[in-house]
């Protein structure tokens, strides 16, 4: 019975997929049609097989309530009978119980699939979110489903370097690098690009966002869902936007949390320039906060003085790395994470303060590389490079990177060059590049979708949310004003969470645009004067 039904479904899915092909996709029609046919074939097979959920691998250290399985996807969707990859999937079933009244049942609404971003992030931990108070109403109605995208974790993992030598520390990070420093970094970028090509071979070209979107449709089918309910965060919003463009009739509900700019001309080189500029503003927010709590941290009573404290620490670390493990680059990376998430502000301010007063312990604890996590970090980096470098053309001439970023670093020195070194392997990438899709949906082509954005998010600058909102007719944009944490779904803002629940549980959106007041700033640490000790010279 089921097999016959799946054969019928395969034909209808194929027709639906071909009818959904976007007219302005920016990809040659024949290859796009071949890959859409391959997606329909793979999805039909996945619907037939389903997912055999069982105990999760012990190495993942997931609780017994989380069940794990795999779904098979083609390496190359133009050849669905060729090489296959297995993607790791995790799930917690909907509780079916109202968290406010355990005697009251809640109807199940299917699976909620989450992609946490990156690219390169492992989403298999998402089902655990259902235990948090902010997620319990959603977890009552939905199976929470996470997965590791192709190349990530247990899903045919990619590698570009030996994990044992990947974490190079301590290292310097000049805000205005010399010609010699640039030459050294160019050499590293070339070696990274070469390592990706050598370790993965011809299959490397198939790790990109378009295939990630196709994988998502196969996962939908394997879960037994006719239409997808999806929550994408950060890069996951771009993945969701591609999915909505390729498979509009397969969308049920879709949340874009911390939306990146999907405009083809900004993927990915110009998006990274925008990001570096936005991080300067968010770094200023942290410095202003630390200055307001000068009595706690002693870093300076205005933002300029806090910057001076940071520069003082950088200078000392360049001469003598903290604990032999933390140099200027590790300090900058630790504070960059604070620019992503303001709940880290007290921890980072405390560590910087303690270091300047002679105690490097908290800084070493927060900023050092952890050898036990080296393989996971290297894998995430490899997938990030594979996807972003494959997704779109990048400038191949170093002079373009040098010109654009030298100019930008004059007004945004905090993150500009660090961002260059992260992405520079794409200048020397081997293999063909994809042409980004022209993401868009006309009125009536999609069900209503929900976009969540913090106004001062630096990792996903707010203009990206506005652009996505403009491109998806019928979308609703919820803005957290004067806030900048990266990803706000299920966070500390009750107003945002109310809109999220109204949409996922009742399909209700707040018109075209709604706004929420910011969540409270983090409280500083204990207001006690640290013990003064001579600091390093």
Image: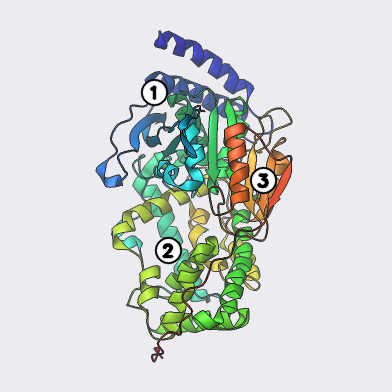
> How far apart, in angstroms, are the residues tagged by discs 2 and 3?
30 Å
**Residue on which disc 3 sits:** 263
Report whether residue 267 is seen: no
> Residue sitting at 41 percent across and 32 percent down?
93
**Residue on which disc 1 sits:** 50
> Residue sitting at 47 percent across and 51 percent down?
385
Disc number for residue 481: none
- Horizontal side, residue 211 vs residue 532: left or right: right
**Residue on which disc 2 sits:** 188
> How far apart, in angstroms, are the residues tagged by discs 1 and 2?
43 Å
Badge 1: residue crowd in 10 Å (few <14, some 14–19, many ≥20): some
Residues marked 3 and 1 touching at CB (< 8 Å): no
In x, y percent, where is residue 255? Answer: 59, 40
Image quarter in which the N terminus is found: top left
The tag earlier along the polypeptide, 2 or 3, is 2
In x, y percent, where is residue 217? Answer: 50, 29
Secondary structure under tag 2 reads helix
Depth check: give the residue in front, 310 or 380. 310
């Amino acid at each position: 019975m089921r097999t016959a039904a799946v054969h019928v479904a395969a034909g209808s899915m194929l027709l639906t997929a071909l009818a959904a092909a976007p007219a302005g996709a920016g990809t040659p029609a024949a290859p796009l049609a071949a890959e859409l046919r391959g997606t329909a074939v793979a999805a039909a097979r996945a619907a037939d097989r389903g997912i055999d959920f069982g105990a999760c691998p012990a190495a993942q250290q997931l609780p017994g309530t989380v069940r794990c399985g795999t779904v098979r996807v083609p390496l190359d969707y133009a050849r669905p009978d060729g090489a296959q990859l297995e993607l790791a999937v995790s799930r917690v079933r909907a509780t079916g119980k109202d968290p406010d009244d355990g005697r009251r049942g809640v109807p199940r609404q299917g699976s909620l699939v989450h992609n946490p971003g990156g690219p390169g992030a492992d989403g298999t931990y998402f089902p655990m979110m259902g235990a948090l108070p902010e997620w319990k109403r959603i977890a009552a109605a939905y199976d929470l489903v996470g997965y590791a995208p192709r190349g990530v974790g247990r899903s045919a993992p990619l590698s570009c370097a030996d994990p044992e030598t990947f974490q190079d520390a301590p290292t310097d990070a000049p805000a205005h690098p010399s010609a010699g420093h640039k030459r050294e970094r160019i050499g590293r970028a070339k070696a990274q690009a070469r390592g990706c090509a050598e370790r993965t071979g011809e299959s490397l070209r198939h790790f990109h966002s378009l295939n990630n979107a196709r994988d998502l449709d196969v996962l939908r089918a394997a879960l037994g869902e006719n239409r997808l309910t999806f929550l994408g965060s950060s890069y996951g919003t771009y993945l969701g936007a591609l999915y909505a463009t390729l498979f509009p009739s397969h969308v049920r509900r879709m949340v874009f949390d911390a939306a990146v700019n999907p405009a083809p001309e900004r993927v990915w080189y110009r998006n990274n320039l925008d990001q570096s500029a936005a991080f300067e503003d968010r770094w200023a927010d942290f410095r202003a906060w630390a200055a307001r709590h000068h009595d706690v941290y002693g870093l300076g009573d205005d933002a300029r003085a806090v910057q001076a404290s940071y520069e003082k620490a950088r200078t000392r670390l360049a001469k003598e790395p903290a604990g032999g493990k933390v140099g200027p680059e590790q300090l900058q990376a630790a504070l960059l994470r604070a620019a992503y998430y303001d709940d880290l502000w007290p921890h980072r301010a405390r560590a910087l303060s303690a270091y300047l007063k002679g105690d490097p312990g908290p800084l070493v604890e927060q900023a050092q590389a952890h050898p036990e996590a080296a393989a996971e970090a290297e894998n995430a980096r490899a997938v990030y490079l594979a996807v972003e470098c494959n997704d779109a053309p990048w400038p191949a001439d170093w002079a373009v990177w040098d010109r654009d970023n030298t100019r930008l670093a004059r007004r945004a020195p905090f993150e500009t060059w660090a961002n260059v070194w992260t992405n520079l392997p794409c200048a020397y990438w081997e293999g063909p590049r994809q042409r980004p899709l022209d993401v868009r949906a006309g009125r009536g082509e999609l069900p209503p979708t929900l976009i969540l954005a913090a106004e001062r998010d630096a990792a996903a600058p707010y203009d990206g949310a506005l652009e996505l909102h403009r491109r998806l007719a019928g979308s609703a944009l919820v803005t957290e004003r004067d806030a900048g944490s990266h990803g706000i779904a299920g966070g500390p803002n009750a107003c945002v969470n109310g809109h999220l629940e109204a949409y996922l549980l009742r399909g209700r959106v707040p018109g075209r645009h709604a706004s929420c007041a910011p969540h409270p700033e983090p409280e500083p640490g204990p207001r006690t004067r640290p013990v003064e000790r001579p600091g390093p010279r």
